[in-house]
Amino acid sequence: MELFQAKDHYILQQGERALWCSRRDGGLQLRPATDLLLAWNPICLGLVEGVIGKIQLHSDLPWWLILIRQKALVGKLPGDHEVCKVTKIAVLSLSEMEPQDLELELCKKHHFGINKPEKIIPSPDDSKFLLKTFTHIKSNVSAPNKKKVKESKEKEKLERRLLEELLKMFMDSESFYYSLTYDLTNSVQRQSAGERDCRPLWQKVDDRFFWNKYMIQDLTEIGTPDVDFWIIPIIQGFVQIEELVVNYNESSDDEKSSPETPPQESTCVDDIHPRFLVALISRRSRHRAGMRYKRRGVDKNGNVANYVETEQLIHVHNHTLSFIQTRGSVPVFWSQVGYRYNPRPRLDRSEKDTVAYFSAHFEEQLKIYKKQVIINLVDQAGREKIIGDAYLKQVLLFNNSHLTYVSFDFHEHCRGMKFENVQTLTDAIYDIILDMKWCWVDQAGVICKQEGIFRVNCMDCLDRTNVVQAAIARVVMEQQLKKLGVMPPEQPLPVKCNRIYQIMWANNGDSISRQYAGTAALKMV
């Protein structure tokens, strides 16, 4: 879509649709594309992919409009639904301030043979407008009140810092995804339950994962069908989509199949061996979001830090099979004070004062997922023991038959990077995995549903959690492929398929780790 700059507005236009963004008060308004003729000297700045929303960093500062400047196609989900990753954003001040060099792709219609958008020579009225702006800025700068000048500089400094963080969050992490035709916030099972719901996509999203909900609020409140085109629900998390080939004649090539090498390069597609699509979709909750050591445990609304729902999706012919798991911080009030490496954890509230908030968390989880199997991976000795003990006590006090608690001391069992020992856990819970089933849909509808989920956690819900979730998901995937006749009953996943699958889960762990801890995961799957 095209982005125009006029004296009083920024105007986004595609086809017969236009969105006018006021440079006076930050208001957003839908107008017909023909109204561009009424704008004052519009200049086409270039092309953008869509609107993320707007944000005001301080009540005394202007609104900022955030646009998707560049995207990358991640892949296609069943039904030919494209999933894209936000790779670059553009930020525009909804004020009289002139825009910075946005580095937008130029549209051929308005910039044929031109490398940069050219500004039109100001008309006499335009000159008055610019003179007025300059006079206003000058009068503010030269104000004799030193206190106001200092406050103004502090606000500008704060705004600059927050804008830098905003750009870093969207462009450095590469963790924001969207689809114009597929609901990334909802699992296949939740979508199939509402398949007769004819509302637009953005009205059917899972509120927990609608990351730009408040940034786009001006549009969602308009309430007319015309607005649907402009609203793009965005998730934070991870998405990877691959096509795998079940070929037992191939051996693994470690040089070509490594975490640094895109898995597609190691996938050999042919017409002899069965193939299937596998997708990983991780959705990070917008509630209690924040970085490690700043966000731990539960809050007063029952939300926990680093809560992520991960869906593994398999598609073969017309069959789509989905299995979901969640991760989230231990839902008690706890923290780690200080900035040194691995501060000692402490409990911040008593057992009695925690009960209501622990209950609020799991009551919501049981309402959504029906049954919960907790896999607690924290150390059963040493400094982590205090958190594990508090967790178990709260589970016993909650006393709900739909909640199962499993403790597995990951560091004890997998000492020396022997992650294959996680099979001890998957063997122990194998019957639970089978009883839980998975969601299975085809063209006729729902064949079966997943009954409950695994809620996996360690201290950070990062490295250990990702290894265990990958192991559980692999058991499920092998069962699914055998049911569909893609894999022989007594054979494991082919070596090459398994390697690509491991890379996908390792990438998932790295991405979630960067979002919560600022670094990639330490443990490979």
Image (cartoon, helix red, strand yellow):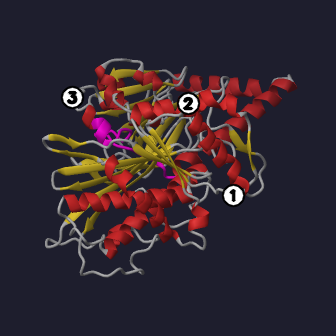
Coordinates of residue 202 in the picture (x, y in percent): 35, 30
Do the residues bearing badges 3 and 2 touch, measured as CB atoms within 8 Å? no
In the picture of the structure, the residue carrying the numbered disc 3 is 196
* Residue visible at 38% across and 27% down in the picture: 19
Residue span colored magenta = 172-191
Tell me which corner region of the image, top left, top right, bottom left or bottom right, holds residue 157.
Answer: top right
- Secondary structure of the residue carrying tag 3 is loop
Do the residues bearing badges 1 and 2 touch, measured as CB atoms within 8 Å? no
Q: Residues within 10 Å of mark 2 (few under 14, many from 20)?
A: some
In this rendering, the answer to whether 307 lies above or below 248 is: above
Q: Is residue 247 visible?
A: yes
Observer-nearest of 370 and 292:
370
Q: CA distance from mark 1 to mark 2?
A: 26 Å
- Secondary structure of the residue carrying tag 2 is helix
Coordinates of residue 8 in the picture (x, y in percent): 50, 23
Label 1 amino acid? Ala
Please, what is the dominant secondary structure of the magenta stretch?
loop
- Secondary structure of the residue carrying tag 1 is loop
Q: Is residue 178 magenta?
A: yes
Label 1 or label 2, whichever comes before in sequence order: 2
Q: Residues within 10 Å of mark 3 (few under 14, many from 20)?
A: few
* Residue visible at 50% across and 57% down in the picture: 466
In this rendering, the answer to whether 374 lies above or below 203 is: below
Figure quadrant of the N terminus: top left
Horizontal side of 342 relative to 8 (left or right) equals right
Label 2 amino acid? Ser
Label 3 or label 2, whichever comes before in sequence order: 3
* Residue visible at 31% across and 43% down in the picture: 450
In the picture of the structure, the residue carrying the numbered disc 1 is 381
In the picture of the structure, the residue carrying the numbered disc 2 is 359
* Residue visible at 33% across and 57% down in the picture: 476
